[in-house]
Image: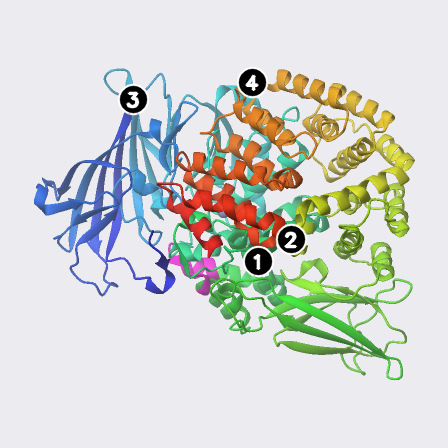
Amino acid sequence: PQTIYLSEYRVPAYLVDTVDLRFELFEDGARVHSTLAIRRNPESEEGAVPLELDGDSLVLESVALNGQDLAAGEFEDRGDKLIVASVPEKFELSVVTWIEPQNNTRLEGLYKSSGMFCTQCEAEGFRCITFFPDRPDVMARYKTRVEADKSAYPVLLSNGNPIESGDLDDGRHFVTWEDPFPKPCYLFALVAGDLVEKRDTFTTCSGRDIDLRMYVEPRNAEKCDHAMDSLKRSMRWDEDVYGREYDLDIFMIVAVDDFNMGAMENKGLNIFNSSCVLASKETATDAAFQRIEAIVAHEYFHNWSGNRVTCRDWFQLSLKEGFTVLRDSQFSADMGSDTVKRIEDATLMRTAQFAEDAGPMSHPIRPSSYIEISNFYTLTIYEKGAEVVRMIRTLLGPELFRKGSDLYFERHDGQAVTTDDFVKAMEDASGRDLSQFRLWYEQAGTPVLEVTDQFDQGQGVYRLTIRQSIPDTPGQADKKPQHIPFALGLLDEHGKALPLRLSVDEQDAPTERVLELTDAEHVFEFHGLTEKPVPSLLRHFSAPVRVHYPWTREQLLFLISHDPDGFNRWDAGQRLAVDIIQSLVGQPKDTPVDPRLVTAYRHLISDSALDQALVDKMLQLPSEAYLVELASDADVPAIHAARERVLKHLAIALRDDLVACYRRNAGDGDYAVTPEQVARRSLRNTALAWLLMINDEEGRELALRQFREADNMTDRMGALRALVNSEYEADRDQVLGDFYQRFQADPQVVEQWFSVQAASSVAGRLGKIHDLLAHDAFDWRNPNKVRSVVGAFAGQNLSGFHAEDGSGYEFLADQVCRLDDINPQIAARLVTPLARWRKFAPAYRGKMKAALETVRDKSGLSKDVYEVVHKSLV
Ligand code: HT7
Ligand code: ZN
């Protein structure tokens, strides 16, 4: 497969002004008539070169230039390209292609999901529909006529506004849509199906009424309210916080069951994975409600950050994704708790993005090459990209950042631009020089900050030395220091926040500062102190970096109860738990657990005056995945055992406190997804899970009762998960059976049922995983099902996946090979756990590598899987 390089970017030789599409949809395929108004690009130096259009899996029926059919010798159909050797400066090209959506299992382009037609064109799916210059810097105005059988497909949708509709012969009908905004083809969408419509309206800040519509299968009609409410909140928030008003008259959301990712921001017609949009309290957990709100917001925010201003090329993907993730994260924080959201974001970064950044696929947020762009929809592009934009905001302050955002949208509206254009707008609006900051876009890897300190009692000066280094990553060594905002505070022995005087005579010094690191080493002096303070470092996770500081356990315990910054209180708790668990890895089972952890946790569980949402987060022990990420030569079973040892130790010591916590948090009144209720439900589910870890009879009874009596999925799933992870085998089988019986008609709930089993180190043995794959409800063509069994097993059931005999690895390799023939995008994502083989202890490493080699040797490997496997084997 061919590697694409950023350095080889050239402006398009031809531009497309308008696209006129006509889709004839049938059961055995679809005919696509496309007419393009094309002209030579005045900015291209290429001149009168042949016209090259991209294609994939198309059957070409005809090509005409300015209405004249082209003869065989006048064009060349190479499959992946349609080449017309000689074209005038300005012309109309008409192409007719035949495609087979019903056989499209890759779910790129036009395909069928549960009987409906739908599309996914990002990144390069439009070329699976018709021949086209499939690149985001070719922006055109689209008119789309959709024709289909009226009784099977009463709803026919595309981007923009409906301008015409009517009946045709043979029980068929059509609707024509027109989108007034020029857009790249990756934002094109079409839907045809037998769907129910849910309507609402939103009045924008300038007084325009927007028609809001959701289209779902009839069985999901009652699961739309939450997404609709989330949409309205997002629209208002984007006006209030970013000054962005919606532009079309209609905004539509469609739910489909088979979808490769979470959702897609097609202009005016967002398409969602059903699991990321449909919710009722009986079928969706609190976490799902929150995820839906965030994803609806994310897709909506793309209307400006992505659609009105789009990417010049796919190397700029983080331009839209990083900025939009920051925007959705600010939105979620505003809808709930700032601290809790920051903890969740930092957890994801540290657990999964840092791992990606240290692995074989490590890449900068603006990569310089790729083989398959679908492999670059990564945590680095999305989450680290958002952290990078967040750092710009931290450096500029909220007002100048907003000024920069306004300038960016105003300057580039209707354009396809680069990350550099974004940074330039921020610079121009603020007057700040971000040249060194741009290294965040170019250099991969997680910076490491080594922090040491020293107190000069005589001078009353506290010296903090911070050394920055960035590890080598594939193709990048000897990196330059980056510009890092480093927020900190200092506490005295009573926990009082000390003024941070950077000079002896500084008056009214703040108690929190953002230091700017630009050199490989900095020494900061804080004056006017009478005792050595306790540092509270990298507050709010002010930069996506690792901080190493020789904290003592006393200092961490002190910060857990005294740090005025909620995020860092949580962070101190995590560091303490990590330290204690790490000290037990590979140690005999009876090695004592530091009793101070129990004291700290008892305080958290029993003090109801504390912010319960924060307490809930603080009670969660660092995950196995995070402990693995922190380890080198990771021995997963040993890490799993040490973590379980601590968990059980805490559960035994705090048994009565857990029962009290459960009872105190029982009963919410009417179900609502408020921060208070979410925290209560989560706390009582944590208490249940811990009690069942130690085979507590009362805990078992509470869990069984909660399972039976629950009126919402959070409670039911909390009880189910606790029982599935317990040693009460008969109860486990009973509740799993009951659950399936009750919810078997609901695919989203069945997915949860699959994943709670596959992710369990107790219930998810390999034999069980095979049973799940053989289950009637399992479907290889449905990505959610594959993720909920194979993905959950390899990504969450770490001790099962890393079985000593290597059976987990062989299993995954087999499934990846099988899936690669069906859906390469999903196969490439699934192979990731094996690709990290270098991270693990020698006994595991060799077996992982061998499994990966079997994937490499599969014949007809897709370029998606090829890229991941080959990059991880070099
Ligand atoms: N921008 C969307 C990306 C996306 C996607 C990419 C590749 C293959 C399938 C896909 N479905 C959606 C989603 C988003 O970031 O909002
Ligand atoms: Zn996005």
Q: Which residue is mark 2?
A: 629
Disc with the residue nearer the chain's start (2 vs 4) = 2
Above or below 415: residue 29: above
Q: Nearer the viewer, residue 428 or 864?
A: 864
What residue sits 38% from the left and 41% below the top? 121
> Residue at horizontal 42%, vertical 50%?
867
Tell me whether circle 1 and circle 2 mark residues in contact (CB < 8 Å). Answer: yes
Cα separation between marks 2 and 4 = 38 Å
Quarter occupied by residue 481: bottom right
Q: Which residues are magenta?
A: 408-420
Q: Is residue 51 left or right of residue 122?
A: left
Please give the count of numbered marks on the rendered protein: 4
Query: For mark 3, what is the residue?
Result: 173
Which residue is tagged 1? 358
Q: Is disc 2 placed on a helix, strand or loop?
A: helix
N-terminal label among 3 and 4: 3
Residue 548 seen in this snapshot: yes
Please name the amino acid that badge 4 sits on.
Ala
Mark 4 = which residue? 745
Q: Amino acid at mark 1?
A: Ala
